[in-house]
Amino acid sequence: MVGTDGGALKALRAGVPPHIVLGDMDSLPADRREQLAGAQWVAAPDQEASDLEKAVHHCVDLGATEIRMAAAGGGRIDHLLAAYSVMVGMAGRVDVRLCEPRAEAMAVAGDAAIYGAAGNTLSLVAMAPVRSVWLDGVRWPLRDEALLPGSRGVSNRMETGIARLRVEGGTLIVCRLWSGRGG
């Protein structure tokens, strides 16, 4: 588990001590660092990338093929949007997901199987035009349809435990809510 900067203390308080603390350490007070003494420290002072983006790339450099981000926004909408942007940038290369207590989001370019349960809400969000989308295993399937930025694609329902998605000519953000509610 990688904790980024001050988020490493939040992870520790949540009972998930990080193995690695990575970042520029601008939000981790020096007097609190002893609480994370058992972790490996990775200084990443580059101000051209967020600590989250640096952590994702560090994990990829270590050979990770699946990355789960939690509390990625840190209460800031700009950081949350940047987390989505990082996911989009990694789409098709590494399985990066933003996880919340009752939902997950991922960026898909190409083919994907989305696992869940019948009744789960499944939303497709286009941040830029997507040329062709195919979606099966849901109440309202899509067959070679374009999706444009907007709300079309939001609040579909999984009919089985797996939905199959094909995205051509772009990248979609896919959100799955654990229950049938929420959309």
Image: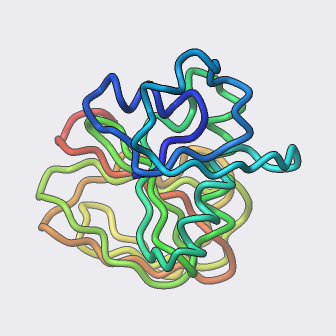
Residue 79 is left or right of residue 159, and the answer is right
35 and 17: which is toward the camera: 35
Residue 183 is left or right of residue 180, and the answer is right
Q: Position of residue 175 (x, y in %)?
A: 41, 51
Number of numbered discs:
0
Which residue occupies 15% across, 63% down? 159
25 and 130: which is toward the camera: 25
Q: Position of residue 138 (x, y in %)?
A: 25, 65
Residue extending farthest right: 48
Which residue occupies 74% across, 39% down? 24
55 and 102: which is toward the camera: 55
Which residue occupies 22% across, 35% down? 181
Which residue occupies 74% across, 27% down? 26
Q: Is residue 41 above or below residue 29?
A: below
164 and 147: which is toward the camera: 164
Q: Position of residue 9 (x, y in %)?
A: 46, 26
Q: Is residue 156 above or below residue 92?
A: above
Residue 73 is left or right of residue 111, and the answer is right
- Which quarter of the rendering shows the C terminus? top left
Q: Is residue 74 above or below residue 72?
A: above
Question: Which colour style is shown?
Answer: rainbow
Among the 4 quarters of the image, the one containing residue 177: top left
Among the 4 quarters of the image, the one containing residue 90: bottom right
Q: Position of residue 133 (x, y in %)?
A: 52, 76
